Image (cartoon, rainbow, N blue to C red):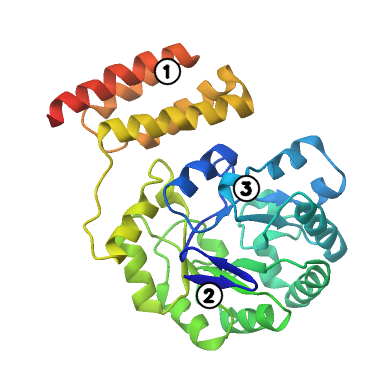
Amino acid sequence: MLRIGSLQLENWLIMAPLAGITNLPFRMMVKKMGAGLVTTEMISAKGLVLKKKKTLAYLLSDIAEKPLSVQIFGSEPESMADAARIAIDSGADVIDINMGCPVKKVVKTGAGAALLRAPERIRAIISTVRKACPVPLTVKTRSGWHSNSPDTLYIARLIEDCGADALVLHARSASQGYSGEADWELIRKVKDAICIPVIGNGDVFEPSLALKMRGQTGCDGVMIGRGAIGNPWIFKQILALEAGLPHQNPTPAERKALIMEHFRHLSRLKGERAAARIMRGLLIRYSKGLPHSSGFRGDITGIKDFDSLVSTMESFFNNLGEMES
């Protein structure tokens, strides 16, 4: 169990915000598979304040995915506070401030990981958002701008002192991007240095690694990002391992059923043809490591609508089922 401010979660597993991935249909899938908390894609505070239609669409939610964390990014304290109010009015249960995104178009605006080089700006943003935010407030950050940053613990204490209810640490520096290995030892050091819950993030690609991270670092929760793309079952598998049960991979029938459910949610949100295009990319992830998946990936390019998806899926997963039998 994990408590963030006034919010008690069902468990300690959290789905990370991923641009282009953690839309409503995907969040519905990982919630169904056991995630204790799901998070929106990173949302521009400026876009929310200007009421841009495309930006506001990121706030679309469903009661079945609750509780929901909404992640916002920006560099202006008042704009971030206004964005938090808009998100809360739309049903956000948690507000998460992004202070770790290393993407150039975000960093050049002074947002995301750029804030790691501006401690006073961090203080202003968190303090201002805290005053405007009656729901739990979290901050997702990285270990520093560069590897071996001496400021990791200083930034963590600053985040706590400004009123955040929890800190999520992706144990890589901004300059690393997603290369190299996450330094879990930094998660342990931050956990020892502050009193608010610390949620570890980075390199949890297998169910056993979530338990290993928690045992090795003492972190209160684990956030999973890339490890859940194409494998939302990872949350269910982690919980099984925690209960002393062997984790089981989904059967072909279970995998097919979840993919079809994901497509139906996408179709309602985007329309059938747009959903089919999105699904082509997701199917590459869903089929990774399965027998004859290379041939399946070739067939994926022909998916244009519901009927072609069903036909392609039936052929591939029926063959898998026969092989298992």
The image quadrant of residue 209 is bottom left
Q: Left or right: 160 with respect to 205?
A: right
Query: Which mark, by number, is residue 309?
Result: 1
Residue 252, visible in the rendered structure? yes
Looking at the picture, does residue 296 appear above or below residue 189? above
What separation in Å lies between label 2 and label 3 (alpha carbons)?
A: 21 Å
Left or right of 93 on screen, residue 302: left
Q: In this view, does 144 lie above or below 105?
A: below
Q: Residues within 10 Å of mark 1 (few under 14, many from 20)?
A: some
SS class, disc 2: strand
Residue 182: x percent and y percent?
Answer: 42, 66
Q: Which mark is residue 198?
A: 2
Is residue 143 at all visible to an observer of this figure? Answer: no
Checking the image for residue 41, the label placed there is 3
**Around disc 3, counting alpha carbons within 10 Å, would you say few (fewer than 14), some (14 to 19), or many (20 or more)?**
many
**Reading the chain from its start, which is encountered first: label 3 or label 1?**
3
Q: Badge 2 local density, few (<14 within 10 Å), some, or many (20+)?
A: many
What type is the residue that disc 2 sits on? Val
Question: Residue 296, image x and y in percent?
Answer: 31, 23
Label 1 SS? helix
Q: List x then y, in percent, for residue 279.
A: 48, 27
Residue at image coords 14%, 31%: 324
Identify the residue at image location x=54%, y=31%: 265
